[in-house]
Image (spheres, helix red, strand yellow):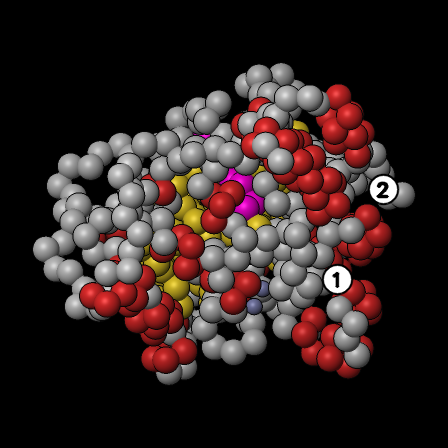
Amino acid sequence: MNNSKINKLQFITSLLLCSVLLGCENEVSKKETVETNETKSVSQFDTSDYRFPREEGTTKGGYPVTLSGKPITKTPLIINSEGTKVKDYPEYYAPGDETLAGNEMRITIMGSGTPAPIRAAQATSCVLVQLGNGNNFIFDIGSGTVGSLFSMGVHPSELDKVFITHLHLDHVGGIFPLFDAMGWARNTPLKVWGPSSHTPELGTAAFIDNIYGATEWHRQSKQDVVPIQGASFDTKEINVSLFNEDNAQQLVYDNDGVRIFAFPVIHSIEGAIGFRLEWKGLSMVYVSDSEVSTFEAEQSKGVDVLIHEVVPSAEEFAIGNNMPIEVAKRVIGHHTTAKKLGYFLDLTKPRLGVGTHFQLGDQTNDNLFLDLRKAYDGPFLLAQDLSTINITPDYILMRQTKLNLLADPPPPKSLEGLELTTKEHSEAVIPEWLTNTMIRLEE
Ligand SMILES: [Zn+2]
Ligand SMILES: [Zn+2]
C-alpha cells in the first residue's frame, strides 16, 4: 500500500472514530468520506464544532439543551437599565479575537463537572477569571482543564496564579499538566494559594511539596533544556486556624488593584475555603463544594457574579452513579442541592448566580431549575464547560466559547532575566552499554 492510500485510510478511520467518540452527527463525516479523494491535513478541519455536538433546541422546561452551543439560561443578557449601550459581541466568544474594556471582567468556566461520574463532556472544577488590566486568575485546577486553558489565547506564563478551594482531586487533579507547562511555555513559578488544615500534612503546602517530590525524575531529565523558573512552585498556604466569628475573611492577594479574600466554608473536613475577587468596583465570588451557611451568605452579599456548586438530589445521584441511596445521601450531604442554592441566592441576591459542579443532562437540568426556582427568581446560568460571562458595571453577557482545538499558546511577552538552563546535569545517566546500541543516522 502506498503512502497516500495509508493516509486516506487513516483519515477515514479518524473521521469514523470521531463520530463514534464524540457523538457528532454523521452528516459531515459521511459526505467527507465519500467525496474526499485527496488526503486532508488535520488543520483543514473545523474542529471547533466538536464542542457543540448537539442540535440547538430546548428542554421540556424551556432551557437550551446541553452542548448545543447556547448558554443554559433564559436570560443570556442582563442589562441594568433601559438604554444601556451593550458592546457588539459576536455570538460566540473566540479567544484571541476580543479585547476586554478597561472596566470589564471575563469569567470562563473551564470545568463544570463533578467526579461522580467523570464524563467526556465535562472537565472537573476550574474557573478562569480575566480582567481588563490583563490579569488572569485560575480558581481550582480540576483534571481535563489544562488543554482548554492553554487554548484561551493566554501564554502559560500568565496562567501562573492558582487559587485552590480544597484538596479534593476533582479540584486539583490538573496541577500536574499545568506544572508541566515548563520548557518554552510557562517560565515563571507556579503560584498556588490554598488552605491549611488540621495538621500540616493535610494542607496545601504539603500537597505541593509532594508534587514537587513526585516530579524529581521529570525535572532532572529536563535540567538542561528548560528555564528553571518554570519548574518551581511558589506556595502561599492560607492559615484556616486564623478564621473565627470576628475574623471572617483574610486578604490573600492585593496587587494591581485586584484584591482576593478567602473565607472558610463547610465541606467534609477542616480546610475548605471560598474566594471573593474585587477589582474596579466589580466582584466575583467562587464557592465550590460546600454546605451553604449564613456565614457564607454574608461573605457573598452584593457580589456581581456568584459562582457556586450545585449537585443533583440524592435520588438522582444514586441512579447516575449506581450507588445505594444511603451512600448517595451521605455524599450529597456535604454539598448544595438546587433547592438550597435557590434559598442561598435569594439571601445573597447577586446580579448573576451561576451553578457549576453539576452532572448536566436535559432532565437533570430541568429538575435543577424546578427546585431552584422554588426560592429564587433572579438571573441564573447553569454552567457548561467553556461558558463565558462578560461583566461590566452596565450589563452581564453569557455565551459559549468557540475554541480552536488546535490553537498554540501565544509567544511569551518577555524572556528577560530568565535563566534558561542550569549548569547541573542529572547523575542518572543512561549506561554506556545501552547508548552504544543507538542507531545513528545522518539527519
Ligand atoms: Zn469536595
Ligand atoms: Zn468537588
> Magenta region: which residues?
103-110
Q: Secondary structure at mark 1?
A: loop
As drawn, which residue projects farthest toward the front? Answer: 1
Q: Nearer the viewer, residue 347 or 237?
A: 237
Residue 374 in view (yes/no): no
Task: Give the residue at x 52% y 78%.
Answer: 269
Q: Is residue 385 above or below residue 212?
A: above
22 within the magenta span: no
Left or right, 215 with respect to 343, comes to left
- Mark 2 Cα-neighbour bin, 10 Å: few <14, some 14–19, many ≥20: some
Quarter of the N terminus within the rendering: top right
Residue 185 in view (yes/no): yes
- Mark 1 Cα-neighbour bin, 10 Å: few <14, some 14–19, many ≥20: many
Q: Secondary structure at mark 2?
A: loop
Picture quadrant where residue 379 is located: top right
- Which amino acid, by three-letter code, is at mark 2? Thr
Q: Nearer the viewer, residue 259 or 426?
A: 426
- Which amino acid, by three-letter code, is at mark 1? Pro
- Residue that mark 1 sits on: 312
**Chief secondary structure of the magenta span?**
strand
Picture quadrant where residue 58 is located: top right
